[in-house]
Image: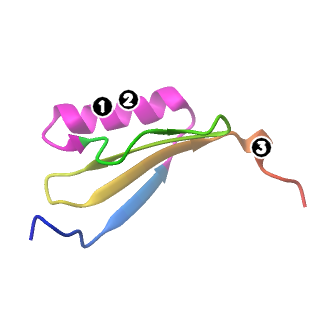
């Protein structure tokens, strides 16, 4: 049913601009962009969209320099 989701996928991109590009393209081609609020934490940026089948996609970028060295 349209009120539930069977799959949620996450994709990492090289830049904030790439996250914006894919999410905006999904919205312009029948999907629903930004089904959740945009997240900009400085070191990490994320958006989301639902595709035509109702699957949820999380698109994000994370600054590799912000990853703690262990």
Range shown magenta = 12-32
Query: Residue sitting at 27 percent across and 32 percent down?
Result: 25
Taking depth in this image into account, of 56 and 42 the one nearest to the observer is 42
- Residue 16 in the figure: left or right of residue 70: left
Left or right: 49 as drawn, with respect to 45: left
Q: Secondary structure at mark 3?
A: helix
Image coordinates of residue 69 in percent, x first then y, are 88, 54
- Quarter of the image for residue 4 reads bottom left
> Where does label 2 land, which residue?
21
Are there few (<14), some (14-19), or many (20+) residues within 10 Å of tag 2? few
Residue 48 coordinates in the image, percent (x, y): 36, 47
State which quadrant residue 28 falls in. Answer: top left
Place of residue 35 in the rendered image (x, y in percent of width and height, measured from the top left): 28, 47
Residue nearer the viewer, 63 or 40 = 40
Which of the colour schemes (rainbow, by chain, secondary structure, one colour) is used?
Answer: rainbow
Count numbered badges in the picture: 3
Q: Quadrant of residue 32?
A: top left
Give the mark nearest the N terminus, 2 or 3: 2
Between marks 3 and 1, how big is the CA–CA gap?
26 Å
5 lies above or below 58: below
As helix, strand or loop, the secondary structure at mark 2 comes to: helix
The quadrant the C terminus occupies is bottom right
Disc 2 to disc 3: CB gap under 8 Å: no
Residue with the most extreme left position: 1
For disc 1, the marked residue is 24
Circles 2 and 1: CB distance less than 8 Å? yes
Regarding mark 1 in the picture, which secondary structure is present there? helix
Q: Which of the two labelled residues, at mark 3 and mark 1, occupies the earlier sequence position?
A: 1
Which residue sits at x=84%, y=53%?
68
In the drawing, what numbered circle is on residue 66? 3
């Amino acid at each position: 049913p349209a009120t539930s989701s069977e799959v949620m996928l996450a994709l990492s991109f090289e830049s904030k601009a790439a996250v914006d590009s894919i999410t905006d393209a999904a919205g312009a081609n029948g999907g629903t962009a930004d089904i959740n609020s945009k997240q900009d934490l400085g070191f990490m940026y994320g958006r989301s969209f639902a595709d035509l089948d109702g699957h949820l996609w999380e698109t994000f970028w994370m600054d590799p320099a912000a990853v703690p060295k262990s």
